[in-house]
Structures are given as structure tokens and as C-alpha cells.
Image (cartoon, helix red, strand yellow):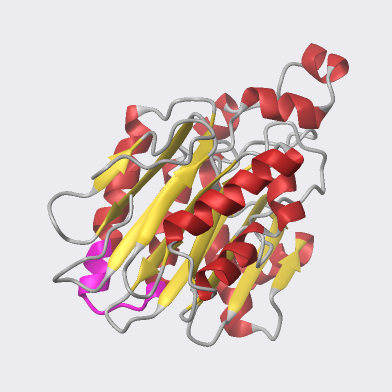
């Protein structure tokens, strides 16, 4: 799936995670809504950074994904969330890890970028930052925290959490990339971690260069999947390097995802967007909830963009 918009320069891409479970109709509809709102912002000349933040915020607030309200609780029953965001003009970036109690960790990540001299803030300090700027808090009890729970205790006893996590295949990290009317790129991602997670575990999502990267001279990338493997391969930055070397988004994705599978048996999906409007959505998992819109026709949202390990995109 590689396209270049002919009449509109702006384009938005979004994902709701890649894994072995088929996305639900409400998840697909939520992705479509986020695309519509994001593209409307792009046509109102909003910057890519604001567009990405808003689209991810729609998914965080929905409770339908493993992000924001829908975040999986960790083994101690607490929701701890990670997020990051990056813009491609000046390479400014921000992230939070192990943030508790707030609906929109992506907003906290942007605050780290714009209000501090840092790139990553973690734990209670991230919480203090969110509190200082009066971000929206998560109610004490939500349907998401009642429905989503770690794996049964007998499964934890019989299996290591990492192995169980792969079998469950519930990645559901959310992310987005955007190209605005000024030709600038941005990328972001947000997650509640994994269903079976040791308190304090941090995945790829808040790590610039692993889960997220944006550079106008190469491209914008947002990853999803098995976080530990994405970190080990430095996927987002690796993809950006391939793009800068002249690879098309499709070729870069095929090479990087192929090596992820062959070398460390990882699983992942990615959004890749260049400043010329070319993009790809690819994954190694059976399913990936994702979509795009460049203003031509209705938003395109699907539950699958490639067969497992084949890395081929259907014609659009």
C-alpha cells in the first residue's frame, strides 16, 4: 500500500495495534473517527504534531485499545502507561513511561517535549508533571479496568510472562503519523504495556528511535507489536536510516520487518510516511488495525494489511 496524494499534500495514518486477534468493529470505527478528525485538523492548517496528538487522544479516550482508559493493568493491578511524540522539522521529542492515573499520556509526552529540557520522564515524576498541567485524570473505576485483566493465575504459574504475552497476541498499542500542509512530519504512540507485565517494565513506545521516530529528511515511523524485540532492533530509527538512504517505505518495511522475524523471531507492525506523501502500512502479525486518509474518498480502515510474514500490501 504505497500512495502519493495528487491534490492534497496532507495525509494522516493511524494504527490500533498488531497481533493475533482480529480487531473488533468498534475499534475499526474508532480508528475511522480519529482519521476524520485528524484530517480535518490538517485542512485547518494545524501542524502535524497537533494532528498526531489529537488522533492518538481519540483512541486513548475510547477505552477500546490498550492505551489510556483501556490500558491493561500490570501484575499488581495498576495501569501504567507509556507514550512518546516527535516532530520532524527540529527533531524535538518527548515521552513518558509508567504514568499512572491519566487518560492522555500522549499529552504528557508532548508536555515533556515543550515544557522541559528533557526527552523522557518516568514514574511518579511523570505523574507530577501531568498533575501540574491539570491533565484529565482517569476515574477510580472504569469499564476498561473491570474488563481488561492480566492472564489467569494458573497461566502465570505455568508460563513465563514473555512467552504468554506472545501467545495472547494482544498488543493493541496505538499510534499515528501525519504530514501537514507545511510539509512537516510527526509521529507518536501510546500504550498500556502488555497483559502480563512486571511492574516497572517499559516497552518500545516511549523510546525515541525504537517505537517512534520522525525526521522530515527521512520519514515518520510509528511501531506496534512485541516491544522487547522492537527495542532490540531499534526499529524506528533503523527504518528512518533506510528511508534516508533512498529506500521506498515499502522496501524499508520489508527489509526491517524481515530481519526482525528472521533474527530474533519478533513480531511488529509499522506506519511509515515520507514528506513526499509516500507511505506504507505493513505487519508480520495476522492482524493489524490501521488506516489512512489523504482526502480522496472515504478514510481507508482495515483489519489486515499483509499476510503473516509475506510483507505484501494489497492494491488500494
Could you tell whether 141 is left or right of 159 in the image?
left
User: Where's the C terminus, which quadrant?
Assistant: top left
Q: How far across and down, in percent of the image, does residue 145 sit? A: 59, 33
- In this rendering, is residue 74 above or below 316? above
- In this rendering, is residue 284 above or below 107? above
Q: Residue 190's image quarter?
A: bottom right
Q: Is residue 103 visible?
A: no
Magenta stretch: give its range: 39-48
Could you tell whether 311 is left or right of 190 in the image?
left
Give the residue drawn at x 59%, y 37%: 171
Q: How far across and down, in percent of the image, does residue 139 sit? A: 55, 45
Decide which of 108, 213 is in the foreground and name it: 213
Decide which of 89, 152 is in the foreground and name it: 89
Magenta highlight on residue 42: yes
Give the residue drawn at x 68%, y 50%: 230
- In this rendering, is residue 145 above or below 58? above
Q: How far across and down, in percent of the image, does residue 229 sit? A: 72, 46
- In this rendering, is residue 59 above or below 63? below
Give the residue drawn at x 58%, y 59%: 105
Decide which of 233, 63 is in the foreground and name it: 233
Magenta highlight on residue 188: no
Q: Is residue 263 visible?
A: yes
Could you tell whether 220 is left or right of 315 in the image?
right
Q: How far across and down, in percent of the image, does residue 15 sit? A: 43, 48
Q: What secondary structure characterizes most of the magenta part?
A: helix
Q: What count of labels does the image hold?
A: 0
Give the residue drawn at x 76%, y 37%: 197
Amino acid at each position: 500500500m504505497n500512495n502519493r496524494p495528487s491534490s492534497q499534500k496532507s495525509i494522516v495514518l493511524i494504527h490500533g495495534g498488531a497481533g493475533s486477534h482480529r480487531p473488533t468493529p468498534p475499534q475499526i470505527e474508532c480508528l475511522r473517527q480519529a482519521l476524520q478528525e485528524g484530517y480535518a485538523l490538517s485542512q485547518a492548517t494545524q501542524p502535524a504534531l497537533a494532528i498526531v496528538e489529537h488522533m492518538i487522544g481519540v483512541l486513548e479516550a475510547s477505552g477500546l485499545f490498550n492505551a489510556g482508559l483501556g490500558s491493561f493493568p500490570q501484575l499488581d493491578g495498576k495501569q501504567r502507561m507509556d507514550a512518546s511524540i516527535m516532530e520532524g522539522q527540529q527533531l524535538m521529542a518527548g515521552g513518558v513511561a509508567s504514568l499512572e492515573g491519566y487518560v492522555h499520556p500522549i499529552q504528557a509526552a508532548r508536555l515533556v517535549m515543550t515544557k522541559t529540557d528533557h526527552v523522557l520522564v518516568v514514574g511518579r515524576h511523570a505523574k507530577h508533571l501531568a498533575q501540574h498541567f491539570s491533565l484529565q485524570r482517569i476515574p477510580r473505576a472504569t469499564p476498561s479496568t473491570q474488563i481488561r485483566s492480566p492472564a489467569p493465575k494458573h497461566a502465570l504459574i505455568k508460563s513465563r510472562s514473555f512467552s504468554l504475552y506472545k501467545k495472547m497476541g494482544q498488543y493493541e498499542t496505538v499510534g499515528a503519523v501525519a504530514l501537514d500542509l507545511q510539509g512537516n512530519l510527526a509521529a507518536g504512540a501510546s500504550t498500556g504495556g502488555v497483559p502480563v507485565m512486571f511492574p516497572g517494565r517499559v516497552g518500545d513506545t516511549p523510546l525515541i528511535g525504537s517505537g517512534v521516530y520522525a525526521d522530515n529528511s527521512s520519514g515518520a515511523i510509528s511501531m506496534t507489536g512485541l516491544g522487547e524485540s522492537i527495542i532490540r532492533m531499534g526499529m524506528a530509527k533503523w527504518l528512518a536510516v533506510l528511508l534516508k538512504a533512498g529506500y521506498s517505505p515499502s522496501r524499508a518495511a520489508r527489509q526491517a520487518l524481515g530481519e526482525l522475524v528472521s533474527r530474533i523471531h519478533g513480531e511488529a507492525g509499522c506506519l511509515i510516511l515520507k514528506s513526499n506523501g509516500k507511505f506504507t502500512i505493513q505487519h508480520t502479525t495476522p492482524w493489524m488495525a490501521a488506516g489512512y486518509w489523504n482526502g480522496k474518498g472515504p478514510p481507508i480502515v482495515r483489519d489486515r494489511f499483509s499476510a503473516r510474514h509475506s510483507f505484501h500490501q494489497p492494491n488500494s
